[in-house]
Amino acid sequence: MTDLTQDMGEGASGPARPANSIFAQDARTKRRNAAERRFRMYGVIALGIGLVFLVALLFAIVRNGTPAFTQTFIHLPVELSEAKLDKNGNRDIEQIKKVSTFGYKPLIEDAVARALEENGIASPFEDAGDLTDLISSAAAAQIRDLVIANPDMIGETVEFRVLAASRVDGYFKGRVTRESLARDKNLDAEHLDVADALKDAGVIEREFNWDFILGADASESRPEQAGIGVAMLGSFFMMLVVLLLSLPIGVAASIYLEEFAPQNKFTDLIEVNISNLAAVPSIVFGILGLAVFIQFANLPQSAPLVGGLVLTLMTLPTIIISTRASLKAVPPSIRDAALGVGASKMQSVFHHVLPLAMPGILTGTIIGLAQALGETAPLLLIGMVGYIASNYPDGIASGFLDPNSAMPAQIYEWAKRADPAYYERAWGGIIILLVFLMTMNIIAIILRRRFERRW
Amino acid sequence: MSIAKLTASTLAIAAVSATTAAARDQVQIAGSSTVLPYASIVAEAFGENFDYPTPVVESGGSSAGLKRFCEGVGENTIDIANASRAIREKEIATCAENGVDEIIEVRIGYDGIVFASQLNGPDFTAFEPSDWFTALAAKLPVDGEIVANPNNSWADVNADLPDEEILTFIPGTKHGTREVFEEKVLMQGCEDTGAMQAFLDSGMDEDAAEAACMDVRTDGKSVDIDGDYTETLARIDSNANGVGVFGLAFYENNTDKLKVATMSGVEPSTETISSGEYPVSRPLYFYIKKAHIGVIPGLKDYAEFFVADEIAGPDGPLSEYGLVADPELADTQAKVADEVTMDSSM
């Protein structure tokens, strides 16, 4: 009793908990808790670093790439002079075709001089020819194409929307300054004064450039004309080959391995090799493709068909692994039930197991395709880098067999070129590629969310 | 069942490709990445002005291009190889072995090799071949003895140069440009400084002395760039004291970042190169497979269009981009028109 009251008295003045109380943390527990807090903090820091990198990357891509989607255009009424384009005046198409794009230069010269005059801008140049440096050399081809398609228009004055030269475009985008032009022999600061005046007059405008998304590649001297459209078609035909070959082969191989094959050393060996193949660097498939498809099988160079075959080899292991995983996830009770009511092994697979595994298979396929879409290394070896994507394929067979590039290869090629204007286009190309990859991944996620069943 | 379908579809694709592969209507070109910009400009203009499809130009280097060119005759081989150097005897022999015995050599013009550094960096404005040799050689004769290159700063090499640590970015050995750099800069410098004689005096034979002249130090002061000029530019961008080797056309497109140095007192430009004053230049070529003329539509038209005055002449778009026009262009035009092959012209 006395002990108790004594204790209580002491408790009132200040608690002295027993050493083994669960409220008092001993040194070891404190260390353990601190270690846990530290570990959580490390996790948050790691996540933070990852996010910072992601944001920095996306920011860089968007900032560098968005200017590629707009382009500076000049609205120019051009007089299609009969004296220059059709000397005989008989509108013979063969005669008109003989006038090359160089023959159209004087027309553009006149048109620019007139545009300046109409807007009351004094030309700082003695020679009217210097003014044409404002305009892309693509303009001559644009006018010639129209004249050849409509010879009747000769003699009329037609309003064209022509591309401005890449340095003029760069000036309005802030890439080119008067100081940087001081040492540049392609354009002078006076040109920029004229460009500013024309912009005020509404002759020069910066507009959204569909040709960047839909157009063909251009040569080194005309970055303003280059587009990723043809390379996009090349990628499309390659993906078609990959889908048509790797999905049936991959699914057939996995069904056999998973449902029918006996478990022995040989199938084990195959399994190990499939997993290994998934980790093989893609350039290896490129050199294999060069040796087998081009040098041995004599398939055409730079063709999307060959590119597709190479990427198929690369995608197959991914598809097989994901298909096997989703087949494995179907519970054995379903197979047993099917076999129990008298279905054959094949019926049980095709009527019950495969439909249930389908969402997983499709997800794996789409992710494999997305991987193949972004792949550049094997394409370098089969001749898909260079000035390749210059013609639209004119049909299905031509799409598979005519030389073409692919989106990532085109981006690589642009990044290599000398003119800084191509650098901007490389970033723009990355945005388009990313949009495709994101769309494919989102489709994969939706498929998985909506159709996947859990047991 | 799916396996049967699959085999059928694979066979169908193979059959389609085998039949259609036999009809190519497009000129195919591969080779030097130095010639690629010019070839792409010509190919684009060719596609615009003729009814043929635009030719396809692949890059990959002179040697790789010529190797593919010499693989044989047929629609699955390329028609034209671009090269930043002349074809070698050995390559002609390989070609002949594979049935490519009629080759038309076309010289399209000259390309200058320039030495440039950061626009706002140290004053690297004038070089001599001897400066480059003394800065880059692996071994140098000092007081009668051959020792490892002791120079760390450009000022050690030549008192007129800035006192900056030596850091150069030169083309890797797979580039045709490296060969020109070795011959016209390092060899020249080696002879100018008397190092060549010193190597010979030290008991080396002629070949060993030449090799010693072109041997570049490997202690990190000189970096081989195996990629393109864009990579060299990126290195220069991040190293204020770096000096890089570029093509004239590349430099002219990037004058906002680079400043060029004179070599032996001459500023590189299309004029000084065509007059022969600027010492570091080389001819550019393309090679046509004569057996393909008449088989591949547009091949001869492309070659003639390439060397036409309005394209490769001094006022043409190639010259505008940085190619130094060939003063003997008329001879080349005649050669292409008559399809003169290398053997008969030799």
Image (cartoon, rainbow, N blue to C red):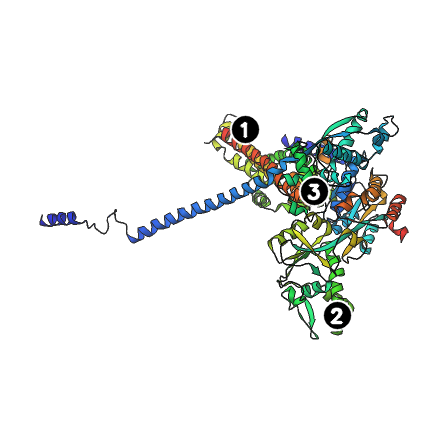
What residue is disc 2 on?
Answer: B194
Q: What residue is disc 3 on? A: A190
Which amino acid, mark 1? Pro
Q: Amino acid at mark 3?
A: Glu
The CA span between labels 2 and 1 is: 82 Å
- Asked if marks 2 and 1 touch (Cβ < 8 Å), the reply is no
Q: Quadrant of the N terminus of chain B?
A: top right
Q: Are marks 2 and 1 on the same chain?
A: no
Residue projecting furthest to the left:
A2
Identify which residue is drawn at 66% across, 39% down.
Answer: A169
Tell me how far mark 3 sits from mark 2, CA to CA.
50 Å
Residue A450 visible in the shown view? yes
Give how far across and how far down residue A420 sits, in percent. 66, 45
- Neighbourhood count class around disc 3 (C-alpha, 10 Å): few under 14, some 14–19, many 20 upward: some
Q: Nearer the viewer, residue B291 or B28?
A: B28
Residue B173 located left or right of residue B341: left
For residue A263, say whether it is visible: no
For the point 43% across and 46% down, the residue is: A43
Q: Which mark is residue A355?
A: 1
Front: mark 2 or 1: 2
Subunit bearing disc 2: B
Q: Considering the numbered disc 3 on the image, is that residue within a helix, a strand or a loop? A: helix
Q: List x then y, in percent, for residue B142.
A: 68, 73
Q: How far from the left and from the top, in percent, is residue A220?
A: 72, 43
The label shown at residue A149 is none
